[in-house]
Image: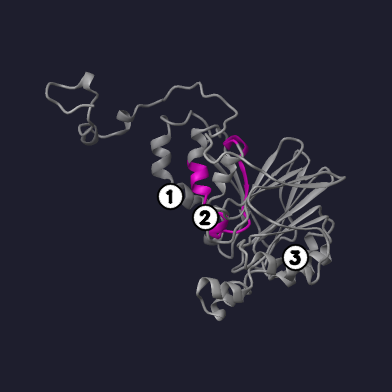
Amino acid sequence: MRVTVFGSGYGYVRAGQADQSIYVEVGNGDTFMFDMGEGAEANYMTMQVPYSKMTNLFVTHLHMDHLGALPHLYAFGPSADRWTPMNIYGPSGGTPELGTRYMVDGLKRFTNWHVTSFNGIAVPESDGYTINVHEFDYTLNPGIAYQNNDVVIKHFPVAHSIDGGVGYRLEWNGLSVVIASDTRPSKFYVENSMDCDIFMHEVGPDPKVFSETMGVTEERANSMIASSHTLPAALGKIFAETKPRLAVATHILSNANTTLPTIDGIRTYYEGPLAIAEDFMVFNVTKDKITQRIGIGPDNPWVYTEATRTDKPTYKHDDLNSAFIKDSVIPPCKDAKDDELCY
C-alpha cells in the first residue's frame, strides 16, 4: 500500500501547502482519493498522477478546504484521459440539502457552461462527465462505503461543525489506513482506529497562536478551533489509546510557531512513531515496515496521460457559436476579403 499526502493544509491555501487530499494506491492497482482540497490537484499533476487514476473520490465532509479543487478536477479530467465516470462517495447530511448528492447536483450546474463548450471539441465521446454518486448514511458506525476487489472502505461519524462528517478506514491484504476528517476528540475515531497501520488524524493549531497570528480574539479562535478540531495534547491521548504502527498528524498550518508546539502537545501523552504531514509525503506500507519519504517532481509539468487520443472533434467552434458571435471573429488573412482586418 502506498499513501501520498497531496494536501496537508488547514483552510487557507498557500504556495507550499495545499488543502487536504490523501491518495491511496493498493497492490492490486486500485487507487482512491480522500478529499480534494484547493491546491491539491496541482500536486497530483506534479507527481504525474493521470486523471484516469483519479476516479474514486471519498469525501469526509463538505467544507471547501476538502472539496475546493473538485470543480476543476471534474471539468478538465475528460480533456486528458479520464473517460470513465467519476465515483463520488460521501455522507448524507442532517437534511437532504446538506448531503453529498445535493453538492454534486450543484457541481453539475456550476460547471454546465464549461462542460457544454468542451463536449465534442476538447473531449472524446465518453462517460467522462458522468458522476456516480454513492451517498451513505453518515450515522452508521461503521458502515461500508466501498467493497470491491478485496478492498473494504468503512466509514464512521465524526464530531465536526454540523452533522454529516465522517472518517474512513481502508483495508486491503491485511493492511489498513485510517484517513482523517476534521473532528473534535471522538469515541467513534478511537473505536474505528484500533490496530491500524497508519492513523492519519487532523490536529488544530493552538487557539492562542491562531489568535495572535490571524488577528482574531481568543474567544473567536476557540470557537473556530477547539469547538470543531482536536488539539495536540488530546490527539496524543488518542494516538496513545489506538497504538497505530505510525501516527500522522495532518490538516495543520505548518509554520515555525505551530509545528513544534504541535509535536510537544502530542508528545505529552504519546511516545510512539509520529509524522507531521507535509505535501508530497509518501508512506510505503508493507507487513514488515513502513517507509516514509518525500516525493519530488517538476514545477511545471505537462499533464501526464496513460492513453492516446485518436478521436476527431465532433464539432467545430462555429457549430456552437451564434451568427452574432461568428460575425465578430477576425479571419485568417487567406480567408479575408479585400481591406478586411485579418491575422
Other-residue count near label 1 (Cα within 10 Å), few / some / many at <14 / 14–19 / ≥20: few
Q: Bounds of the magenta span?
A: 50-75
Element under disc 2: helix
Element under disc 1: helix
Q: Nearer the viewer, residue 263 or 252?
A: 263
Q: Mark 2 touching mark 1, by CB under 8 A?
A: no
- The answer to which quarter of the image holds residue 241 is bottom right
Position of residue 38 relative to residue 300, above or below, is below
The kind of residue tagged 1 is: Phe
The kind of residue tagged 2 is: Tyr
Image quarter of the N terminus:
top right
Q: Earlier in the sequence, mark 3 or mark 2?
A: 2
Q: Label 3 vs label 1: CA separation?
A: 35 Å
Residue under circle 3? 188
Q: Which mark is residue 110?
A: 1
Residue under circle 2? 102
Horizontal relation, residue 52 to residue 216: left or right: right
The kind of residue tagged 3 is: Phe
Residue 13 locus on image (x, y percent): 52, 57
Q: Earlier in the sequence, mark 3 or mark 1?
A: 1
Q: Mark 3 touching mark 2, by CB under 8 A?
A: no
- 42 drawn magenta: no
- The answer to which quarter of the image holds residue 149 is top right
Q: Residue at x 60, y 29 (%)?
A: 306
Q: Label 3 vs label 2: CA separation?
A: 26 Å
Q: Residue at x 59, y 35 (%)?
A: 50
Q: Which mark is residue 322?
A: none
Q: Label 2 vs label 1: CA separation?
A: 12 Å
Residue 299 locus on image (x, y percent): 54, 41
